[in-house]
Image: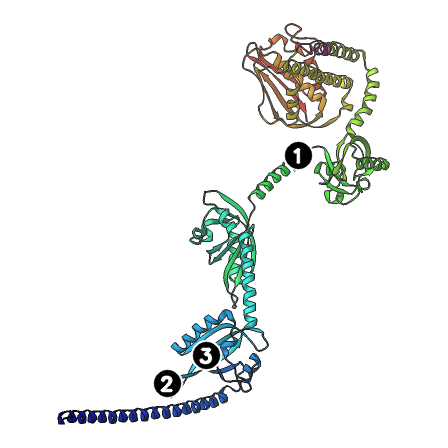
Amino acid sequence: MDNKEVTLLKKALERQKKARQQAERILEEKSKELFDVTHHLKESNSKLENLLNEKTSELDGVFINIIDPYVVMDLKFNVINMNNSAKTFLGYDHTKESLNLASIVHHDFIAYTAQSFQSLIEVGTLKNYRAKILTKAKEEKWVLINSSLIYNTDRKPIAAQGIVRDITQEMEVKQLLAEQKKQLNTIVENSPLGIVLAVEDKIVKTNTTFVELLGYTENELKEMSVRDISAPEDIANSEKLIVQMNKGELDKFSIIKKYYKKDGGFVLARTLVSAVKDEKGKVDYQVALVEDITKEREAEERLRNEREKYSSIIANMNLGLIEVDNDDVIQMVNQSFCTMSGFDREELIGNKAAKVVQVQEGRIIDEKQAERLVGKSDSYEVEVRNKKGQSRHWLISGAPRYDNNKNVVGSIGIHLDITDQKQLEIQKEKLLEELEKSNEGLQEYAHIVSHDLKSPLRSISALASWLTEDYHDKLDDNGKFNLQQIQEKIEGMDGLIDGILKYSSINDATLDNTLVDVNEVVGGIREIIFVPENVNIVIMNPLPSIKVDKTKIHQLFQNLISNAVVNIERTDGLVEISSKENTSHWQFSVKDNGVGIPKEYHEKIFKVFQSIGNNQRSTGIGLSIVKKIVDVYQGKIWLESTVGEGTTFHFTLKK
């Protein structure tokens, strides 16, 4: 080995020695640094533990008397300290066993808890943390926690503290309220009534029924006020009620309102308005329940109209009406029955009919009542005594009265006072006796009336009957109707002739004078006599009611009107009837525009069998009857006539 190689080896060895020394120096430095770090960590841990002990000691002194549970945990959820309330609530004692709060969080709230803890770390406080936990007894509890971080002297978080409040009952109540609200919303939305929530007349919410009722959308309604879509029937009363509600004097009221629909129509609704108040008693908002009564009101209106119509008919008809129950207790009477019986309505309602209105044969009422119970209807006559004790004869038409289930609950009777007819029957016998004793002139007059007037009527009646029987199959409905009209006219005339016969022998002392409305007399005559289409009968002024014998005044006017009608040949025939009142008499006039009567006949026509023209136009007795009736009432009759222009008959009757 030469020197050069030895030199190289020495240099390499030197370099290796230096490198080993440097490595040992570096290792020594790193070992010292590691020792220093380890020592520093031990000191830090000791300081942290001392700090936690100090803080815990301080907090124990502050929160020892807190009623709500109070817990201190490290940043890994391990409990460091807690008060007695927390121990009682959670069932754990941290001094006897370790407790990690994360382990008692309900599994449904683990993710929420992690997010909340992260927020606590970032912000430093956590408010209104709500979650469900499990106590040591495995009871589920709802808790509300407000917490904050605990920092060391370097403002680094080292733990967390929080106050725990048990809100289990509160949450149960809230859940119950939520369920009830859901149920209430279901009821509201499915309610058959429209529901409106308004604040100071402004609509804030409605249900589906109200929306469908008016045709607006809910959003459209929310842009409107209650006044925009409705108007009360009684505006003044409605405004008064609203003022009272706003003052706190009224909690609810009901009114009828008209609600306007989107299509231009409207509905009528019964509206119940209720006030919802705040804790100070001030009206917070108003709730209205809206019930559509349009159809109900229309039905009520129809029913009211029908009821008024029939009530008016019942109240004003001349027949007495009475309703009784199965015990004969009066339930209803009309005014005509009160007039007939002489009792006021209050004296009749609620009392037995047979006792109040004294029926002479009481057993007949019991018999008829038994017949009503089996559904039988009939007519019968009774003698009663009215309130004044007067004897009256009534014709009663009775029928059973049923309830909605078709059970007989009483009877209804229509009463006609036939006392006058009964008296007429008695008078008839007397008149027949007097008639037999009449003088020869009256007997002859009666014979003429009976033979010469009734015989043709009978013949006409017989002929009409034969035509009806023989040509029944050949006559059309119009022909049959005309024949029937003939028979009816004959019957009417036959009745009037009977009246003439009955009163032919009556003198002044036997007149049956009553108050007679002459308008009704003329109206009845127009229905009885034949009036051609070309003739019009006109009453020029309201005719008076006068005290006369009704049959006689009827005969008087019928003869004059018939005489006027039969002597009119014009196409525009006119008969005018008028009256005026004098001091002691009533004066009547019957004017026509007929053929007129020559002056030489002005006296002659009032005599029996005296007439102008051929016999087909006059029987010759009509005007003689007129004059006799006028004479009976101490009056006069005269005429004014121009041939070709017409005739006016004037007559007076003493008052």
- Name the residue furthest front: 1
Q: Is residue 475 left or right of residue 271?
A: right
> Which dot, 1 or 2, sits closer to the camera?
2
Question: Magenta segment, which residues?
Answer: 461-474
> Looking at numbered disc 2 in the image, what kind of residue is underneath it?
Arg
Dot 2 alpha-carbon crowd within 10 angstroms: few under 14, some 14 to 19, many 20 or more: few
Could you tell me how far apart the alpha carbons at marks 2 and 3 are, in whole angstroms?
Answer: 17 Å
Q: Position of residue 570 (x, y in %)?
A: 55, 12
Rounded to the nearest angstrom, the CA distance separating label 1 from label 3 is 88 Å
**Label 1: which residue?**
313
Residue drawn at 62 percent across, 39 percent down: 303
Secondary structure state at the residue bearing disc 3: strand
User: Which residue is at the front of the view, 411 or 259?
Assistant: 259
Quadrant where the C terminus sits is top right
Seen at 43% across and 51% down, the residue is: 220
The residue where tag 2 is placed is 155
Residue marked by disc 3: 147
**Foreground pick, 2 / 87:** 2
Locate residue 509 relative to residue 651 in the image: left or right.
right
Q: Quadrant of residue 158?
A: bottom left
**Residue 381 visible to the viewer:** yes
Vertical position of residue 350 compared to residue 113: above or below: above
